[in-house]
Image (cartoon, helix red, strand yellow):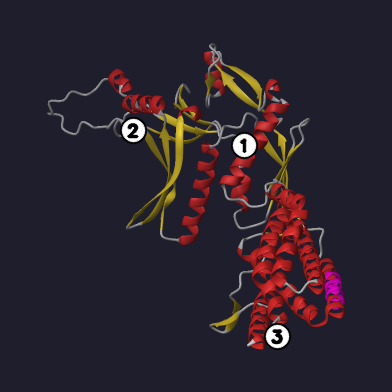
Amino acid sequence: MKKVKILTIILFIVLVTMVAFFGIFVQVQNRMENKVKQYSYDMDFTGGREVILKVDDSKKEIIKDKDGKIIDNATDEEIEQNGYVKEEEPANKEEILTSDNYKKVKTILDNRLRKMDVKNYIVRLNEKTGQIVVEIPENDDISTVTSILTEMGKFEITDSENNEVFLTNDDISDVKVMYNTAQNGTSVYLQIEFKNEGSKKLKEISTNYKKVENSTQENSESEDTEKTDLEASNEKEKKIAIKMDDEAVVTTSFESPIENGMIQLSIGNATTDAETLNGYVKNAKAIATVLNEEKSPIKYQVETNQYVESDVKIEDLKNVGIAVLVIVIVALVLLIVKYRKKGIMSAILYVGVASILLLVVRYTNLKISIGSMCGIIVTMILNYILTFNLLSNIEKNKEINKVANKTIGDFFIRIIPICILTICFSFMPMMTISGFGLVMFWGLVIIAIYNILITKNVLKIMEEK
């Protein structure tokens, strides 16, 4: 019975080890596919996109009337006739270029990237110059992600003629991405919800900016009289402009007053093509993310946008792996030489801990980075120390339960500072540090559970006569 129990445990560990190191392959059509989740790698190993943003120092020419109002699309003749004035306006006024505003922009970008589900990004700020460096893992959504970095997120609904501002970002309650499926395909649109005061204002402007139906006089004997030029001018359709960062994205009027405090903006056209629809959804999500965040106080422009290769080469990883493997083998051989049968069994159990940890790393979506690799190494060192202490104390006292419980308890009491640092590191924003902390957290949990439930009981079985 004793041999059966030990053999069962050994077979279990061998199975887990095979799965962790080699995988489970199943034939899919004409190829073999590994059903075990693959590792996710951080930018330490895969490289990534580096986008350098600088404060926009450009100037644009604007036209103002005598009252200082901005005039859109005026011809040179109109400028001369009406006495309009051309001025150069900087993209960012000098007084807004402060350290506090630079920090505010960094926070806004952090929030945007997080809401876009970007993983393992890094945002660095130079508080003196305002330069921002953003590092993002390279993926299929990179163009959409980089597009939100330079958007100010300024939203306005204005009169299309005189630019009177009716609604701004401050009036928005929420922006959602919505879908509508019909016979001609699926449409994607943004649903912009306004706060109470904004809803009242929207109802007012949707009443005042209603569509005018044009009619022509087809029957000369009709009772209706033809409108004079003055009457026609008075009934000219007024339109509002919906603007993003001072650019009109929609110019329209309303069919009827809006009572529910919401407007909808179509993104693209209805489509049945999955790839096209996915592109519309990504664009809509990017716009919604920008509008749901605070408006950026400073306008930025892209200075550099380039792919940066990792400094770590595959050969370097192989060399490190070989070196670690050699050290582990030497350590386990010493364990076997010193403790014989118990040493052999402890070495097998040690491999089981490593295998379970590697599977946990895969299925908890932890990224393989320099930090997480260091976490794996430190975890295995701690487990070796605990294993050595267990065997050493059991040699002195054959009461396995008592000795094992005391040894494991004393071990975790001694490493309380490491446990505290592990938890702190897990919440750090830097991927290298957080990766180390998260791997260590799972490693310590596995060490505790594994040694209490398996190692202690295996050594107890071996002592049975």
Give the labeled residue for mark 2: 254
**Residue 51 screen position, x and y as percent:** 71, 46
> Do tag 2 and tag 3 residues touch (Cβ < 8 Å)?
no
* Callout 3 amino acid: Lys
- Which of discs 2 and 3 lies nearer the camera? The answer is 3
Q: Which residues are magenta?
A: 322-334
**Residue 28 screen position, x and y as percent:** 54, 81
> Do tag 3 and tag 1 residues touch (Cβ < 8 Å)?
no
* Callout 2 amino acid: Phe
Q: Secondary structure at mark 1?
A: helix
Residue occupying the point 73% across, 27% down: 99
- Of 425 and 241, the residue lying toward us: 425
Query: Distance of mark 1 from mark 2, alpha carbons?
Result: 33 Å
State which quarter of the image contains the C terminus: bottom right
Residue occupying the point 62% across, 28% down: 297
Q: Residues within 10 Å of mark 2 (few under 14, many from 20)?
A: some
Give the labeled residue for mark 3: 465
* Callout 1 amino acid: Ile
Residue 330 painted magenta: yes
- Of 307 and 387, the residue lying toward us: 387
Q: Is residue 169 visible?
A: yes
